[in-house]
Amino acid sequence: MFFSIKRNFQKNRGFGLVETLVAVTIFSLVAFSVYAGFTQILKVMSVLKIKNLAVNLVNEQIEIVRNLPYSEVGIIEGLPLGKIPRKQNILKEGVNFEITTSIQDFDDPFDGVIGGSPNDLSPADYKIVEFTLQCKDCTYPEPVKYYTRVSPENLENQGNNGALFIRVFDADGHPVVGANVNVVNNQTFPSIDIDEITNNNGLFQIVDAPTGTSAYKINVSKNGYSTDKTYTIGSSENPNPYKTDATIASGQVTQLSFAIDKLSDLTVKTKNTSCEAVPNLDFKISGLKLIGENILKYTSNKETDENGIKNILGLEWDNYFFEILNSSYDLAGSNHLLPLTVRPNNNQDLDLIVMPSDPKSLLVQVIDGQTNLPLADAQVKISDINNNVRTLITGKGFISQTDWFEGAGQEIFYNQHKYFSQNGNIDTSNPSGVLKLIKIGNEYLPSGELISSTFDLVTTTNFGILTWGSDQPLNTEVKIQIATNEIVNATTTWNFIGPDGTNNTYYTSPDQNINPDHNGDQYVRYKIFLSSSDPNTTPQISNIAFTYNTECAPLGQVLFQNLNSGNYSLEIIKDGYQTYSVQNISINENWQNFNVLMTP
């Protein structure tokens, strides 16, 4: 009987711990899936509700616009002038919406256009109204745009107004889409204050603008870009501007162009000739762009920190000069020739090499006349009226290649017209001196790669900048990577990397700093990538070069100190170049600089 009871107990016992955990896990997974699906359904319903609210809100705004008299369909203090606010915040069923309204007169070409042939003296044929809605409380606050057209009841009447066409370009002459354009005219009553953006052609047009002489102040900007604007004649900060406030004449088109591009950052380091940081050094940075008679667009005094470093953020593309303001030091040179070229959307480094001041001083920069790059190993001789001669030798300079027409197969760079290899998609000889994509029939291939021969720098070195000359139309791209080695033998591998030290990035614009991971190597190769998304265009490379130096010897530069006031003669000798000589260089300041272009 005992064994019978035991068997019945084992047969009818409950779940164990393992079975219970498995059951709980399965139940949790099913419950989570149901909950997730329910949550997703709620999100979809919420989005649909917000979209319906947005559509209803736009319909209300459209009805308001259509019920206004045509003459009042415009923006308060805008053009066309009217009764509609530029921005509104509207709470609808607990949801906060921001509405931005834009209204523009449209010049329909059916009866001619203003400034054209025939000249349409009544160009405001109808109005385009754009509403941009943004849900301020939503998880996905993406703006939505709606458009409507409003036409006058009667035929247009000839007016006395004119037109203002504003074009915005970048540094390469390409249109800037979505640039912010602010137009202000305080000569009218009420005053005009317009905020609009450029279209896909970089253009913003006002076709029915009241006339006025130097009446329209224009400011063009974009987030992360430089700015450009007009200036008022006779103002204290810029009395004789080159780009004056716009004038609108009756029946005429006033066209103005503005140039803006992405901003760049510059890190300036002040060092002595032993590469030691010189802290807390005052210097002046000045661009070359002028906004008026003898008025620079950018000039500013800066100071490096206790580590000899100054980060200058948000610089516009330009050429910049540097002046040491601390009277205890002279500028002995830099790792880039001055003026420094700052390209758009770049992060650049500049080392200013200084020496204790010993007036009077003369800095001589020796430059290759074809590439504008510094020349190494040039003998620079200066002599005074008593024929006292001093000679200095410029530091290391650059290596470049300007032709590839003799083809592939060269391991070490001896023949300057050859390279190592390519993938067959690069045209190296048509014309000579240019790299471009091969054309098959009437279309260019989409991409190609080329690897250079190995350049021997003779000794280990520090690399400076990578630069090249190119023609790069829209929809094309030039990318470059660099590989270096300390030694080269039969087992050498070349690891091509970009500016961040990995093989996932590329040098995409000239005058970029070469990654310091290459420093200390003697041998270098470059790899060029050309691509185009338009079969009718191709990028072109005309030359490629990189600078390098050892220690902190300024590139292609020498500094003569402890000179006397008076006239000096200068002679520069460099193998492969015509000897340069000039008489009567006047030394009359504590520090001066002199640039020499050498002819091969």
Image: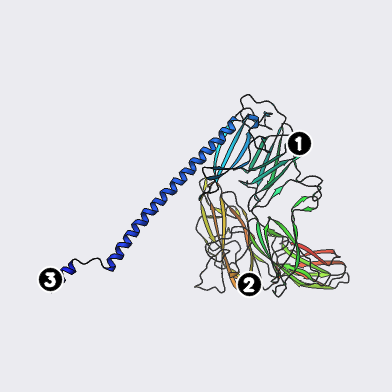
Q: Give residue 212's mark.
A: 1
C-alpha gap between disc 1 and disc 2: 63 Å
Mark 1 near mark 3, Cβ–Cβ under 8 Å? no
Question: Where does label 3 land, which residue?
Answer: 4
Mark nearest the camera among 2 and 3 is: 3
Find out whether the residues at labels 2 and 3 contact each other: C-beta distance under 8 Å: no
591 sits left or right of 199 in the view: right
In the image: residue 17, left or right of residue 289 = left
- Label ID, residue 33: none
What is the spatial separation of the Cα atoms under label 2 and label 3, in whole angstroms? 93 Å
Image position of 301 (left or right of 26): right
Query: Residue 138, position in %: x, y?
Result: 51, 49
Q: Secondary structure at mark 2?
A: strand
Q: Which residue is mark 2?
A: 461
Disc 1 residue type (three-letter): Gly
Q: Amino acid at mark 3?
A: Ser
Where 355 falls versus 73 (above or below)? below
Between residue 17 and residue 272, name the one nearer to us: 17
